[in-house]
Amino acid sequence: MEQILSKYSVSISELKKNPTAVLQNANGASVAILNHNKPTAYLIPAEIYGMLMEMAEDYELIKLVKERENEKESAVKVSLDEL
């Protein structure tokens, strides 16, 4: 059996019947959407989704900085006066 990573869960049928009630009952928490009693999706508040997207973008930028730090030795050094 798969682990449900949310305090609240509803079936897809229940979500279709009254999505507004599902959101209200969750009080801003995530909701596991179940299909045949297995989680198939998670419904999360828009602000949490935005935070997750920012975190993913930050992670990608950190990876890029670390990659470029490793390439420092092959870079051409130039002083600001030379520019």
Image (spheres, rainbow, N blue to C red):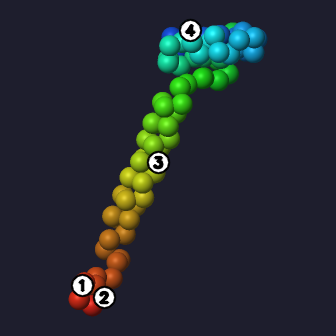
Callout in the foreground (4, 1): 4
- Residue 82, percent across and down? 27, 90
The CA span between labels 2 and 1 is: 7 Å
The residue to which callout 4 is attached is 25
Q: How far apart are marks 1 and 3 (CA)?
A: 31 Å
Alpha-carbon span between mark 3 and mark 2: 31 Å
Q: Can residue 82 be seen in this view?
A: yes
Q: How far apart are marks 4 and 1 (CA)?
A: 61 Å
Give the residue type that dot 4 points to. Answer: Asn
What label does residue 57 carry, if any?
3
Residue that carries the numbered disc 1 in the rendered image: 79
Please say if 79 is above or below 49.
below
- In this rendered view, identify the residue nearer to me: 9 or 25: 25
Q: Which numbered tag is attached to residue 83?
A: 2
**x and y percent of residue 18 in the render?**
71, 11
In the rendering, at what x and y percent does residue 69 appear?
33, 64
